[in-house]
Amino acid sequence: MQRWYRLALAGGRDASEIQPPGTVQQPALPSPVEELCGNMFLPETLPDLRHGNFSCTNIAYYNIYVRMCIAKCDVGYQTDDAGLLFCNRGRWAPIQPEVVSTLVGVGRAADTMPNTDPRALEYLGIPDEIFADVALNILVKLDYVPNLSIVESYLDMVSENNIIDFDMMRQLLIWVGPNIEDIIANLDFLQILSRLETFGATRHPVCKIIKCGEESEGN
């Protein structure tokens, strides 16, 4: 029995909790929280999609998993908008892909999305980019960001065609203030999605047939 172990026992430590010298105790991670549509007894189904189907995956922000589904139309059909839905407190709600990609990008810049498969956005057909105007809107929603006019000027200055580089986003978070990364790390992912929910997008995507440059609803 090694000396450090004997000393720990003599000091009254529980044998199961004793670690070798130099061992860093890892903090306990909170249990995963998965947002489901409906409830465990009666799940809410996705809207019926004729001439297509939905592709779904989970987006994880720290320990919060949100189900997202996007409409995939058959060849020769398309939707009027992206057809992206997310599970928002028991119901399917529409949201713009740019909002999701930017929120994920900001989360990555703050190192808060280790559980998200980097292929998740690709699977949903969402561009893996940070949109400057959406990033500003997200920061506005946080209510804790000082000098928003300066932040807006910075985003305008460093963005190109409204796209901001990942490293520039990280620098912005560092520059805005020492607490912003903690704020983002502890965001209620679902609450922010809810506040950014796109009410103009349809909750019931429809695949419409494409005819000679104009669209009419498929039969």
Image (cartoon, helix red, strand yellow):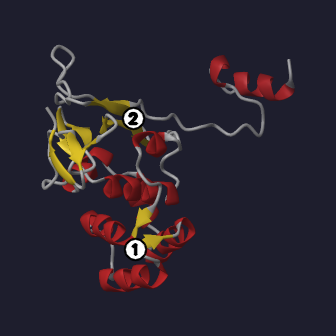
Image position of 5 with respect to 55: above or below: above
Viewer-closest of 39 and 176: 39
Residue 197 can be seen, yes or no: no
Asked if residue 101 lies left or right of residue 43, the reply is right
Contact? badges 2 and 1 (CB < 8 Å): no
Determine which residue is flagged by label 2.
58
Image position of 188 with respect to 145: above or below: above
Asked if residue 103 lies left or right of residue 13, the reply is left
Q: Position of residue 73 (x, y in %)?
A: 30, 37
Eye-nearest disc, 2 or 1 = 1
- Mark 2: give few (<14), some (14-19) or many (20+) Cα within 10 Å: many
Residue at 28% from the left image edge and 49% from the top image edge: 82
Viewer-closest of 101 and 193: 101
Image position of 149 with respect to 218: above or below: below
Q: Quadrant of residue 50?
A: top left
Quarter of the figure that contains the C terminus: top left
Q: Position of residue 165 (x, y in %)?
A: 52, 69
Determine which residue is flagged by label 1.
162
Q: Which mark is residue 86?
A: none
Q: Secondary structure at mark 1?
A: loop
Which mark is first along the chain, 1 or 2? Answer: 2
Q: CA distance from mark 2 to mark 1?
A: 27 Å
Viewer-closest of 121 and 135: 121
Residue at 24% from the left image edge and 55% from the top image edge: 213
Residue at 43% from the left image edge and 34% from the top image edge: 30
Tell me the kind of residue under disc 2. Asn
Count of labels in the image: 2
